[in-house]
Image (cartoon, grey):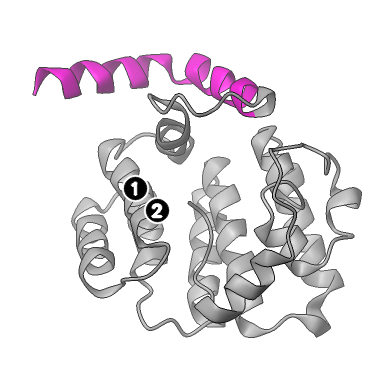
């Protein structure tokens, strides 16, 4: 899950305005993506930078977020800047560009003074190969960070723990593609097939280890 926290009442109202549809990779270029309003660009799974990410066009997704931040700078509030920075860090992590990912995760914390920044800090710990810090951040989210996204946040942190030492893309692919049976959409199926090929050995080893416990 890559949705940064948002005030719950306002989030509910805004989400009602979004179309409820299956995935449709309509924003296939940076130019198309950045023309959206913030909620369409950053929070709608069918629009903005997310279709580019799902195509594994991580460079296009990162370019779209950077261009959106620049083009809409005057209208963005601190939470919106934080969300965009967090998602930019996420895309750089998928690219295995660890230095830029860490830099933007840290910006997401500084843009939006979170009561508990442990979720974002967990990504930094993973990228810095600091498992003890990742475990501590996971505990902090579990104990101190109740809310509508907590269970999804913990799933992503658990994937990073399970695949610690592997590229972040492998952990994220495992979370979204292994054993869920829920990726029937052609775009998701294509994404998962490419990851299964790329990380076949990692996934096979993980499954073998899990079943032997």
Position of 71 relative to 56 (above/below):
below
Residue 90 x %, y %? 54, 52
User: On the image, which quarter does residue 35 sit in?
Assistant: bottom right
Q: Residue at x 59, y 71 (%)?
A: 12
The region drawn magenta spans 188-213
Mark on residue 26?
Answer: none
Side (left or right) of 128 relative to 134: right
Residue 61 appears in view: yes
- Provide the secondary structure element on which disc 1 rests: helix
Side (left or right) of 74 relative to 13: right
Side (left or right) of 86 relative to 119: right
User: On the image, which quarter does residue 175 sit in?
Assistant: top left
- Provide the secondary structure element on which disc 2 rests: helix
Residue 7 appears in view: no
What residue is pinned by disc 1? 155
The count of marks equals 2
CB contact under 8 Å: marks 1 and 2: yes
Residue 111 x %, y %? 57, 81
What residue is pinned by disc 2? 152
Q: Is residue 151 magenta?
A: no
Position of 81 relative to 65 (above/below):
below
Cα distance, mark 1 to mark 2?
5 Å
Which class describes the residues within 10 Å of circle 1: few (<14), some (14-19), or many (20+)?
Answer: some
Residue 85 x %, y %? 61, 66
Quadrant into which the C terminus falls: top left
Q: Is residue 201 magenta?
A: yes
- 18 and 209: which is toward the camera: 18
Which class describes the residues within 10 Å of circle 2: few (<14), some (14-19), or many (20+)?
Answer: few
Q: Main secondary structure of the magenta part?
A: helix
Q: Residue at x 60, y 79 (%)?
A: 10
- 200 and 24: which is toward the camera: 24
Residue 29 x %, y %? 86, 42
């Amino acid at each position: 899950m890559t949705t940064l926290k948002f005030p719950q009442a306002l989030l509910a109202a805004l989400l009602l305005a979004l179309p409820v549809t299956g995935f449709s990779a309509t924003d296939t270029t940076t130019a198309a993506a950045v023309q959206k309003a913030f909620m369409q660009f950053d929070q709608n799974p069918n629009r903005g930078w997310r279709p580019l990410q799902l195509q594994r066009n991580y460079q296009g997704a990162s370019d779209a977020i950077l261009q959106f931040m620049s083009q809409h700078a005057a209208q963005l509030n601190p939470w919106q800047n934080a969300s965009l920075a967090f998602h930019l860090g996420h895309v750089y992590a998928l690219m295995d560009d660890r230095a830029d990912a860490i830099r933007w995760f840290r910006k997401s914390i500084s843009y939006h003074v979170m009561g508990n920044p442990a979720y974002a800090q967990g990504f930094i710990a993973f990228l810095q190969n600091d498992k003890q810090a990742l475990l501590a951040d996971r505990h902090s989210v579990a104990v101190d960070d109740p809310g509508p996204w907590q269970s999804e946040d913990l799933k992503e942190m658990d994937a990073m723990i399970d695949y610690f030492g592997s590229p972040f893309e492998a952990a994220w692919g495992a979370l979204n593609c292994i054993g869920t049976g829920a990726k029937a959409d052609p775009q998701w199926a294509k994404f998962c097939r490419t990851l299964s090929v790329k990380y076949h050995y990692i996934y096979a080893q993980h499954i073998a280890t899990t079943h032997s416990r």
